[in-house]
Image: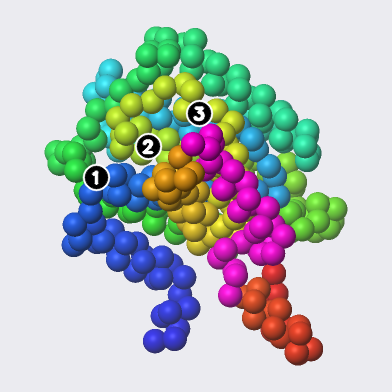
Amino acid sequence: MKGILQNKPFLYILTGLIVAMIPLVTDMDRSTLTMLNLIVIYAIVAIGFNILLGYAGQISLGHAAFMGLGAYISAYFTSNFELPFLASLLLAGVIPMVVGLILGLVALRLEGHYLAIATLGFGVALQQTFKEWIGFTNGFSGARAVTPEIFGFALREREHFFVLVVIVCVLLILFAHNLLSSKTGRALIAMRDSEHAAQAMGVSLFKYKLIAFALSTFYAGIGGSLYVHLIRFTEPNQWGIDVSLNLLAMVVIGGLASIPGSVLGAAFIVFIPEFVKDIEWLQNIKNVASIFTGVALVLVILFFPYGLARISTQIKASLLKRQKQPIPKEMEG
């Protein structure tokens, strides 16, 4: 039994099954179901972003644009060409990944804040393209998406769509787990910890940076596709830098280099606006959700630098340190 509980893929699948059943066996209103769907969708994007930031040590401030690109691609092909939803979902991941590869060939030769500025510039340029390319995006009027269908079954209800996004999320979590447990994952971690040491061990920095960037844009495109079919509408102003900063906050608050941390961070960031809107005395404060996010980000960095996913581990390590006992290796970092 202990061996099964330590099997992470099994736990991911079991957790996914339990979570997917929640809306089917409980009575939830539409707004709550929408929030749950958004948490899982942003968790998918955050997992991809964590591969780039947490595991590869590279930062991007333009990932909202890739999410928007995935949304527009899926809406365009399902509405104008009546492409099956699953095919459009795959295209929404693959095309941003190809664009990410092209961008990465140039941008990933930069480092640190230079890379952040380059990706930010690309994100702004792509957002402006959404505004001007009316034939593809319908400009400021926005694009509408059709009801997704899988094998003839229309996912009109939020409960049914939630099952879909959970399945997609679990599959992508399993892929990320297997990848990060492989030679590629070890190379990414080595590169993050010390580029010079990684090079000395024969790790191709540019190759693995490109892999991480491409995978993160694939996840962003998939998240964008699911988003537009949930909300059924998208417009250019949705995909600005504020979304990219929220993705960054999700990863840092949830936990760098942690798949469960990405999910926790997404839940935290999506839940904040819902939480503060029910507090009457906060209603007159502009951008109060952003203020809460910023405060949470600072507090986590100061007191829980490894994120919410590792709070218990950090507390135990702190107690052992005070008692001057050796910290077990599995609790370090």
Q: Nearer the viewer, mark 1 or mark 3?
A: 1
The quadrant in which residue 91 appears is: top left
Q: Residue at x 55, y 28 (%)?
A: 240
Answer few, some or many: residues within 10 Å of disc 1's Cα (few below 14, many 20 plus, some between 14 and 19): few
Amino acid under disc 1: Arg
Residue 180 in magenta stretch: no
Q: Position of residue 267 (x, y in %)?
A: 45, 53
Q: Can residue 149 be seen in this snapshot?
A: yes
Which residues fall within the magenta stretch?
284-312
The quadrant in which residue 193 appears is: bottom right
Q: Which residue is drawn at 81% across and 56% down?
A: 194
Mark 2 = which residue? Answer: 227
Of the numbered discs 1 and 3, the one sitting upstream in the chain is 1
State the residue in front, 17 or 309: 309
Amino acid under disc 3: Trp
Of the numbered discs 3 and 2, the one sitting upstream in the chain is 2
Instruction: State the CA–CA distance, disc 3 to disc 2.
Output: 12 Å
Instruction: From this view, report whether residue 150 is shown above or below residue 251.
Output: above
User: Which residue of the protein is positioned furthest toward the left in this rendering?
Assistant: 152
Mark 3 = which residue? Answer: 239
Tell me: 159 left or right of 248.
Answer: left
Q: Can residue 51 be seen in this snapshot?
A: no
Q: Which disc number belongs to residue 30?
A: 1
Tell me: 298 left or right of 144.
Answer: right
Q: Where is residue 182 in the image (x, y as percent from the top left)?
A: 58, 61
State the residue in front, 120 or 185: 120
> What is the secondary structure assignment of the residue under circle 2?
helix
User: Which residue of the protein is positioned furthest toward the front in this rendering?
Assistant: 281
Answer few, some or many: residues within 10 Å of disc 2's Cα (few below 14, many 20 plus, some between 14 and 19): many
Q: Which residue is drawn at 39% across and 9% down?
A: 135
Quadrant containing the N terminus is: bottom left
Instruction: State the CA–CA distance, disc 1 to disc 3.
Output: 24 Å
